[in-house]
Image: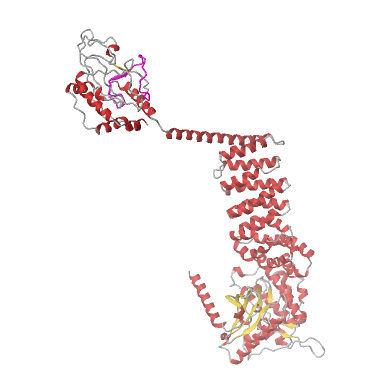
Amino acid sequence: MDMINKFYSTAVQTVSTLSGVLPGNNVTREYEVLELTSTAGVGLMWKVYNGYKKSTKQEVSVFVFEKKSLERWSRDDRETMLETLRRGVQQLTKIRHPHVLTVQHPLEESRDSLAFATEPVFASLANVVGDSVRSDKKLYDVEIRHGLLQLFDGLQFLHNDAKIVHRNICAETIVINKNRSWKLFGFDFSIANQPATDGTAHWPCREHSTSLHVLAQPSLEYTAPELALNGVNTPDSDLFSLGVLIFTIYTGKPLKMFGSDYSGFRRYANELNQRKYPPMNAVPNELTESLKALLHPSASLRPKLHELKQIVYFQDVGVKTLSYLDSLYQWDNLQKSKFYKGLPQIIPTLPHRVNLHSILPYLVKEFINSPMIPFVLPNVLLIAEMSSQREYCDHILPHLKPIFKLTDPIQILLIFMQKMDLLLKLTPAEDVKLSVLPLLYRSLECDMPQIQELCLAVLPTFSTLIDYNAMKNSVLPRIKKLCLQSSNVSVKVNCLISIGKLLENLDKWLVLDEILPFLQQIQSREPAIVMAIIGIYKIAMTNTKLGITKDVMAHKCIPFLVPLSVENGLTIAQFNTIVALIKDMLSRVEQEQREKLQQLSTIQRENKPKDASEILANELESSSVISSTNGNKMDNDMFSGFNSTPTPTPTPTTSTLAPVRPKEQLKITHTSMTPTPLPAPAASKPDILSSLMQSNLSGLGAPAPVPAPAMALTANNGWHSANPLVMNHQLASPQQASSNNNFSSLDDLDPFAKSKPNNLNGANLYTLQQPNVNYIYPMGHGQAQPMNKMTTPTLQPQNQQQQQITDNQNFNALSQQDILNFLN
């Protein structure tokens, strides 16, 4: 938390400082100034901020000098210092060289500040040298070696071409740009050549003054001894300063610190004449002798810059590689191609920061040169492979996006297809949809089978990133078109394999509507293609998410697969695979169709309407079963009122009641002429017919009272019928007779006989006559005819004639419409 608070306070302080310093400076009109990154210049008085140009968004660094930092100086020193700074920036603006800091906007001055804009700067050398430097900013050995070579080139240009002596080569005046190139800066004390009268080069010497502020003069720690001893200033003086700089880089501090002690500096200059050097244990052995030569007190004995480049110290492979990149713009395409071909063997040996910041910028510059892209792109992707996703998105992806759109040279697509797994791993999902997917579409449409096969192989790996519409309207149509039009069997097989891998990410209807019909359009019958088709069918059938329906299997799949099984060229294993798939489909069709038919049959049987005859037949059948089980126990079936048992012996006579066809003939069982009391019937569930009859009879008023003998007979013997077609009050039970009265035949009890004796053997007390039992018939059926043979005998006592009259009246009152409603 303390670190966060410290960072926040620093940011707030920076913003507040800028808001108080820069508003009046013209640099802010064209450039947006961001955070502070480093310091540079004499006394590190220049503050370096990141920024960008408002019009083009081009990244820059803005150098700002705040005049308030000179408030404690005397007026003369303040004016001298400001003039020195102005002169240094103006001189820097005039010089153009790859190893001299490039000024993009000239110096602008306001009441509070001086400011100018340059190329993006990482830090000054003073910010990255020393024990207190963070580990992420410490320099690698290859960076130091390469940086020194760059300084040699810059000084060579300065001395030989520009004829300028820098006079202040030190860690504060060397800046490292964004690409980790070392560049000369701080020309505040530089002296241009002023030829002598004889034409020889001459650089006037300005002796150190103790009256001026120490920062208004070159640093004594880096000043050559001849300036103090002989008053001579030459380009070799910069070489001495270069030697002190090398010593400072490796040890973290100069040879000796003087500050403003000019007399101490003169004494040390005399010591150098005696070749007394400080310990150089931290300096590499290959550089020690050359460093001592640079620190020689005699300027003429110091080595030249071109000689220093040839020492063993600079013959490292990494250094040479970086040096070649510096001079790459001078080479032709053939030389460049040879260099780029060998670069992949060197990149893994270099630190990642060197690859990312020193090599990559040179490589992406070659993207404007189309013939070189196939040679450069593998190196860029190799660096991307060693980068984090954030580094890839910040430094590599912005340069690759324009290359994704290129199709010429064709090798570009091939390289991208080979590294597609890397691109998918590092590229954000949104950029995959916008940049990588169009690249795949173009790859599918190219004419090289190798690129097509690579594209088909990598396409399923990121199918989850492809939305449904893109898959349906862009990806699948291209794969299908390629499979149908290509003459290359390998491409066709890879198309089918790719579709098979994509199936699990598709929905059921897309497969049924797009994939399966497409398979039947393929005319090729090579075994590899046939087996690829079989694989797609098998996946579609076994995948629970997809599941081919039985109708599709029956009408489309099986008729298509059966001919495939007899194609020539199939092996026995391939034939078995096809036949097994066909059998699986047939088995599934059989199972699903049988289940469907069984369900339909059950539903039809449950929903089929029942007519009246079926209802009565079912009721009678259930009554017979229950009666046979329970004996004389009363039940609620139609004929529960009769104390009867089924007997199969007598042949039943067809009843005139057509709709009812009882399965068994009923017979009255007489165990004795004495009526046997029956148990009281249990409360039964009233059936529909009884309810209808009861409702009609109840509307006619109360029936006539039943005579007591009849009531007693009914109560004692239980003569009652549940059949709604029979008027129960008309049923009579036989009266008791003497024990010697036996009926030899049922004919004697026939109530429908025209003439019967009034007694049997002179002992029968009953008067047998045709009973007046009325049945309910449909309209137009006519009167019931007398039965030839008694089926349901009833014995009518004489004392129930009054009840018969009442029942007849009730029967006549029943409406014909109610009877029709019941029968329907």
Instruction: Determine which quarter of the picture holds residue 630.
Output: top left
Which is more toward the observer, 635 or 721? 721
The span shown in magenta is 632-660
Q: Residue lying furthest top in this view?
A: 761
Seen in the picture, residue 86 relative to 464 is either above or below; the reply is below
Q: Position of residue 704 (x, y in %)?
A: 20, 28
What is the quadrant of the C terminus in the image? top left
Q: Residue lying furthest left in this view?
A: 708
Instruction: Tell me which secondary structure the magenta stretch mostly adopts.
Output: loop
Q: Residue lying furthest right in this view?
A: 198
Res. 134 in view: yes
Res. 462 in view: no
The structure residue drawn at horizontal position 77% and vertical position 74%, both measured from the top left corner, is 306
Q: Position of residue 195 (x, y in %)?
A: 78, 88
Instruction: Determine which quarter of the picture holds residue 210.
Output: bottom right
Q: Which colour assignment does the render follow?
A: secondary structure
Q: Is residue 390 magenta?
A: no
Q: Position of residue 100 (x, y in %)?
A: 70, 77
Q: Position of residue 578 (x, y in %)?
A: 64, 36
- State left or right for residue 775 relative to residue 65: left
